[in-house]
Image: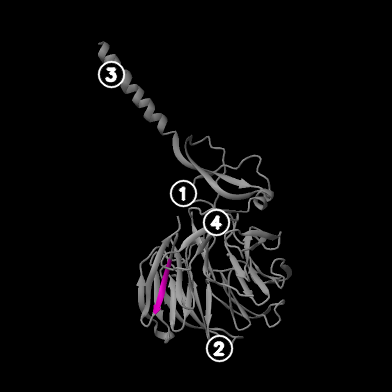
Amino acid sequence: MKLNYIFLCIVGCLFISCSDDTEYEYINIATPITISVAEMRASVEVLPPQNIVESGKIYAYEQYIFVNDVDKGVHVIDNRNPLQPNIINFIKIPLNRDVSVKGNYLYADSGLDVVVFDISQIESIQQVERLENVIENHRDTEYPENVSFFNWPSDLQSDDIIIGWDITVERREILDVETFEISNASDGSTGSGGSLARFKIVDDYLYVVDSYKINVFDIQNLDAPIKVNEEGVTWQAETIFYQEDKLFIGTRTGMYIYDITQPSTPQYISDFDHARFCDPVVVDGDYAYVTLRAGASCMDGDTQMLDSRLEIINISDIYNPQLEETYIMDEPYGLGVKGEKLFICDGASGLKVYNKSDISNLELLQNYNTNTAYDVIPLQNKLLLIGGNTLTQYNYTNTGIELISEFTIQ
């Protein structure tokens, strides 16, 4: 009898426990990690080599390669021996995604600011200038995926900057949650950047694209740039490319062309509209090559039925650009051209090398299924590729490219 009583108690406890579980759920809670604007501006420093968290854009200058670590700073790589690249140091720059270099001065974005570094002594880089509040913060806050609720601190200030997220898993009563759910959360000698760049140096001027305009800086005094103008483009401007006194601006809704015969005052020439996509552009002769990447992240959370693609635009009449050809792609990011070769970073599908001598019939020469291909720079003697935190270098051949080295930043 006593055993039966104990058995019934155990069953009863299990039943109660199961019943209680139906009133709870396990959810991901995200709490923002923030710094103030003053803290951000005071936290720039040059550090020993660091592990990379998330590789972004790349920039090549003389024997050095600068690899952006998204929103964290820049890894400086000595590439005098492409077979064995060597990390020299890390420039910590909060909210950085772009750099450009002229005459041993490096220009970098940091939130709303442009920061200038003297890199003439690469082992001892020095910050020499900061221009505050000269560009718009061109990116919205990026909210983490698979998070049910966001825990906003009560002491959060309007000018605090979100630099990351602390994500925890909590068991909570379904009807007793006090956090707020978020939906539809709203880029004398110079170097070479990729097609995803927002910075471009032309002679004595630095052009910086932010979320809706071109910012013009006079850099005749390399260590003391001056903002001299700004020219509106459209919302969600993303990339900048230069050819023959013209700037080609890639935006999520089209390609915009500006004349910079008068360098300090870009003048609108024409534009070519397309459906909303992420949109880098490169130009070679009479043709502009534009990769259009679909996906919710490129359309503010909206969905779109159109496929990702490469569009080739005839710009022989610069006042009336016309679509010439369209090729379906998988997940295109950066792209580049070198002679008759076209290089496309097609995300998880790798680096694709095309013969573009006949644009109506692109010939796929090679497909390197390497780390997720993100950005590419065709230099004079070699090709640089970044993706999956790995810097890959190739030699050019008559039939495509051949591998020189792969270097994971760690």
Mark drawn on residue 146: 1
**Number of residues whose C-alpha sits closer than 10 Å to that of mark 2, classed few (under 14), some (14–19) or many (20 or more):** few
Quote the CA–CA distance across marks 2 and 3.
87 Å
The residue under label 2 is 316
Q: In front here: 400 or 250?
A: 400
Q: Residue furthest top?
A: 1
Mark 1 vs mark 4, foreground winner is: 4
**Mark closer to the chain start, 3 or 4:** 3
Residue at figure coordinates x 52%, y 67% from the top left: 64
**Mark closer to the chain start, 4 or 2:** 4
Quote the CA–CA distance across marks 2 and 1.
47 Å
**Mark closer to the chain start, 2 or 1:** 1
Q: Which residues are magenta?
A: 392-396
The residue under label 4 is 90
Residue at figure coordinates x 49%, y 40% from the top left: 168
The residue under label 3 is 7
Picture coordinates of residue 289, whole percent (x, y): 50, 78
Mark 1 vs mark 3, foreground winner is: 1
